Image: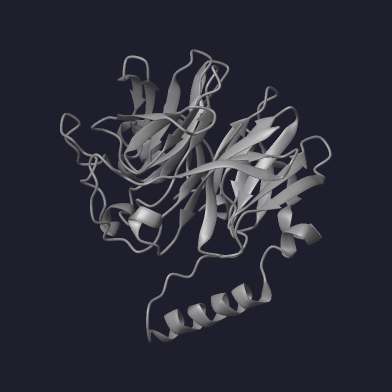
Amino acid sequence: MNSYFTTIVRGADVAHGGELVAFDWATKQVCARVPVMPENPSFVDPNPRGNSRGGRGVAVLPDGRVAAASYHSIYIYSPDLKTHQQFSHPLFAGLHDLVLTERGTLWVASTSVDAALEFDYTSRKIVREFWPREMPEIQKALGVVPLKIDKAADNRLLFLEEHHVRNPSHLHLNIATQWRGEVYAFFHAFGAVANLTQGKILFRDAALKGSHNLIILDDGTAIINNTFKHSVQFCELTSGRILREIQLTDFPAVRRLVRPAERLRYIVRGLLNRLGLKYVSNPLPFFVRGMSLKDDHLFIGLSPCALLRIDLASGKLLDSFSYSHSLASCVHGLGG
């Protein structure tokens, strides 16, 4: 059983900011890895954290090729990662998750501009798009206003500055997916799940702010990585009621991922930042991001960069793999 995952290295220069990695669970070996960085066009990133660094969403295509996103492009790789093609679009800015549709297209979360875009990589065209900040019911429910954007312009490098994501109307739409023919999205900044087809908020929970990923099971259960609670939550899609929760730090193997030296660095960095002596990037231990589902196994990504394989039915940890012990290195996307 293979997994593909992308990484981001916070604080690194853009050229060394992350990778796409192919991993074999049977042998516990890394089969291949390639750097991921914004190119064609490249640029200087003003944000010292993640921002444009590294890889984003991952999706394994029906023919076995692998789609992985950078800040403004989608790359489609051969299964061995030796060859690839680059696809970009003027509305690709701050890409996050990629989700394969039954039609063989990709739902692309263009997070910097709060758009959900259905991209046909064969024709290189966007075939459907949603702009939730322009939807009246979502505006009313969240108190947001439309983004000022010229959709006909090349927007790829226009939303790099941090003030864009700090805007109170920024949703931080980080994934769009489908269930029973309708399109759903998760808004990281509000801890909200929306039905984009109907243009309404299904549920919102302050405890879900900062969370990542959204998988909807056949029975309508929404699975979300609660990043700051270090858990995976199973919610009723229509109400947000928590049906079940897997607390990842309850697993001894997970707790051992953060070494004592990394814990100490985290404490020291936090102290420096609170005292205002020097701002340093201070990645969070057990930062949960990246999720895929295959053969009743749930795959979860963490910081420091590690993968977990969990039995969906029982919630038991079946296996894990540590790729890096540095808190600066974290998983972003997972596929396969």
Q: Describe the colour scheme in one phrase.
A: one colour
Q: Quadrant of residue 167?
A: bottom left
Front residue (pair 244, 6): 6
**On screen, residue 264 above or below 285:** below
For the N terminus, give its image quadrant.
Answer: top right
Q: Residue at x 50, y 83 (%)?
A: 271
Q: Is residue 220 visible?
A: yes
Q: Residue at x 34, y 24 (%)?
A: 129
* Count of marks overlaid on the render: 0
Q: Quadrant of residue 113?
A: top left
Spot occupied by residue 92 in the image (x, y as percentages of width and height): 30, 35
Spot occupied by residue 264 in the image (x, y as percentages of width and height): 60, 80
Q: Is residue 201 visible?
A: no
Spot occupied by residue 309 in the image (x, y as percentages of width and height): 73, 43
For the C terminus, give its image quadrant.
Answer: top right
**On screen, residue 149 above or below 230:** above
Left or right of 261: which side holds 149? Answer: left
Q: Quadrant of residue 222?
A: top right
Spot occupied by residue 65 in the image (x, y as percentages of width and height): 51, 24
**On screen, residue 243 above or below 277:** above
Q: Residue furthest front?
A: 82
**On screen, residue 268 above or below 294:** below
Q: Residue at x 44, y 61 (%)?
A: 10
Q: Residue at x 73, y 47 (%)?
A: 245
